[in-house]
Image (spheres, rainbow, N blue to C red):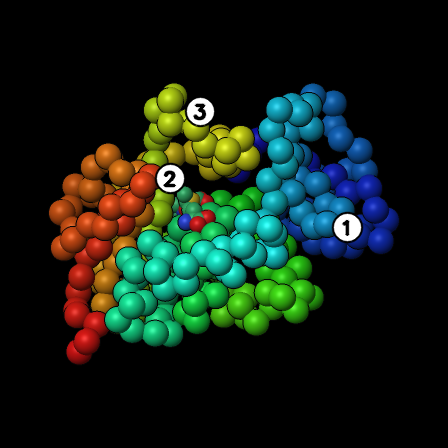
Amino acid sequence: MTPALTLVCQMPQLADHAQRISELLNINMSKRIPDGAEFILNLDASGLSLCKPFDKSVGDLSIDFADGALTWRRQHGGGTGQAIAKAVGLKQKKQLTILDATAGTATDAFVLAALDCQVTMVERHPVVAALLADALERAELNPDVHAITQHMTLHTGSSIEYLKQCAPNSFDVVCLDPMFPHSGKQQAQVKKSMQFFRDMVGKDEDADDLLLPAIEAAKYRVVVKRPRKSPFLNNQKPTLSQEGKANRFDIYVNKGMKD
Ligand SMILES: C[S@@+](CC[C@H](N)C(=O)[O-])C[C@H]1O[C@@H](n2cnc3c(N)ncnc32)[C@H](O)[C@@H]1O
């Protein structure tokens, strides 16, 4: 848990909602920004966001499925031609059930849900899960994205535990995209808000432990997103790899999709 995080809410009409979030996260709630706070969670009319209130060089982190980038991608991003869509096998089979076991800010999950997949997301970082839950709640009121987010469900907790209680073939595909330690040069290239996300979430040191339970739970395949030059997850060679500009998708096939 991020140390000494406070939920700041200055709008009396949102106080009950703020109270529920602060209880869920077991953090203090305040009407003002505590002196010297490194991070705060801010709740206002545009939703929940994580901010560094005294560091204006970084933007706030919030999730909005109707934002410009995701809208552009949904409308012009290439549909089933997108790398993540090819990797999960949408060229071969439609309407896949997908477990995104490392949901994060759910860009991949949203892209797949927009392509008619049913996506179950698991996120263990309580603050990230709270941002995601808030984004899903706001999407319910937005006719542009509601039909898509209806196909997305969120579980908060460890996906290693979640996967262990899944029966074999529980999902057509399991997707994994754990945090990967980045070098200084790579770190400098990512967006400031993403750096900020990485600072908060940390490195996912136990990422290797995800692979075997994921393979057990997947009917057709497990897709692991990695930085292009990084070693295989759990040092396990995939059936095939799909190289992209920045990322590589390692694909562990359990069963062909034509069967
Ligand atoms: C790189 S981000 C995923 C980004 C995501 N693919 C997207 O499109 O936004 C990795 C996320 O996985 C979560 N995570 C890593 N290991 C996990 C685990 N064992 N259980 C649940 N969540 C996990 C981290 O907390 C982090 O939020």
The residue drawn where x is 69% and y is 66% is 141
In the image, what residue occupies the spot 18% across and 61% down?
Answer: 253
Closer to the camera in the image, 192 or 55: 192
Residue occupied by mark 2:
179
Disc 2 residue: CB within 8 Å of ligand 1:
yes
Q: Earlier in the sequence, mark 3 or mark 1?
A: 1
Q: Residue at x 84, y 53 (%)?
A: 13
x and y percent of residue 210 in the render? 29, 50
83 is higher (above) or lower (below) than 170: above
Secondary structure found at label 1: loop
Other residues around mark 2 within 10 Å, as few (<14) / some (14–19) / many (≥20): some
Q: Earlier in the sequence, mark 2 or mark 1?
A: 1
For discs 3 and 1, the disc positioned in front in the rendered view: 3
Q: Position of residue 67 (x, y in %)?
A: 61, 52
Q: Secondary structure at mark 3?
A: helix
Please identify, in this view, whether the residue under mark 2 or under mark 3 is nearer the observer.
3
Q: Report whether residue 157 is seen.
A: no
User: For the residue labelled by badge 2, is the local secondary structure a helix, a strand or a loop?
Assistant: loop
Callout 2 amino acid: Met
Mark 3, Cα crowd under 10 Å, few <14 / some 14-19 / many 20+, is few
From the viewer's side, name the closer residue of 181 and 194. 194
| C-alpha distance separating marks 2 and 1 | 31 Å
Callout 2 touching callout 3 (CB < 8 Å): no
Placement of 98 over or under 41, stated as above or below:
below
Going by the numbered disc 3, the residue's amino acid type is: Ala
Amino acid carrying label 1: it is: Ala
Whether residue 34 is situated above or below residue 256 in the rendered picture = above
- Horizontal side of residue 219 vs 9, given as left or right: left
In the picture of the structure, the residue carrying the numbered disc 3 is: 188
Q: Which mark identifies residue 45? A: 1
